[in-house]
C-alpha cells in the first residue's frame, strides 16, 4: 500500500496487503491470534497508528519472549521513536 512498502515486509512470512480492505482483513486475522500477540504502534502526538509488532514464543516458565513481525510506516522508520517502540 504505497511506494517502497515491499522493503518493510522483506523478512516477514506475509506479503503486504494490496489495498485497504485486504489490510483490514489482515489486521483482523492478526488480532485474533494468541501467539504471537500483535500490537499497534501509536504515535502519541497524533494518536495515529504508525506500525505494528508482535510478541511471540512466549514461555513464562523460561521467562522469554521474542519480539518480531515488526512493520513500521515511513513516518516512524529511521527515527529515535522507532528505537523506543
Image (tube, helix red, strand yellow):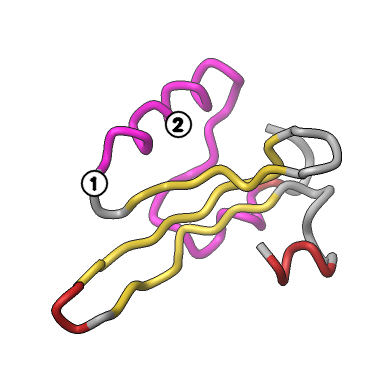
Q: Tell me the SS state at disc 2.
A: helix
Residue pushed farthest top?
21
| Quarter of the figure with residue 64 | bottom left
Q: Tell me the SS state at disc 1.
A: loop
Foreground residue, 85 or 30? 85
Residue at image position (25%, 67%) is: 58
Q: In the visual, does 64 lie left or right of 18?
A: left
Residue pushed farthest bottom?
62
Q: Quadrant of the N terminus?
A: top right
Where is residue 18? Give x, y as percent: 57, 28
Q: In the visual, does 46 lie left or right of 10?
A: right
Which residue corresponds to mark 2? Answer: 27
Where is residue 71? Give x, y as percent: 60, 53
Which residue corresponds to mark 1? Answer: 34
Q: In the visual, does 17 lie left or right of 4?
A: left
Where is residue 55? Give x, y as percent: 39, 61
State which region is magenta: 6-33
Residue at image position (53%, 32%) is: 17
Amino acid at each position: 500500500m504505497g511506494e517502497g512498502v515491499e522493503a518493510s515486509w522483506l523478512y516477514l512470512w506475509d506479503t503486504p496487503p494490496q489495498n485497504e480492505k485486504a489490510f483490514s482483513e489482515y489486521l483482523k486475522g492478526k488480532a485474533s491470534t494468541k501467539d504471537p500477540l500483535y500490537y499497534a504502534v501509536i504515535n502519541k502526538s497524533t494518536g495515529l497508528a504508525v506500525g505494528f509488532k508482535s510478541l511471540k514464543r512466549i514461555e513464562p516458565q523460561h521467562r522469554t519472549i521474542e519480539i518480531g513481525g515488526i512493520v513500521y510506516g515511513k513516518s516512524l522508520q529511521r527515527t529515535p521513536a522507532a528505537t523506543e517502540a
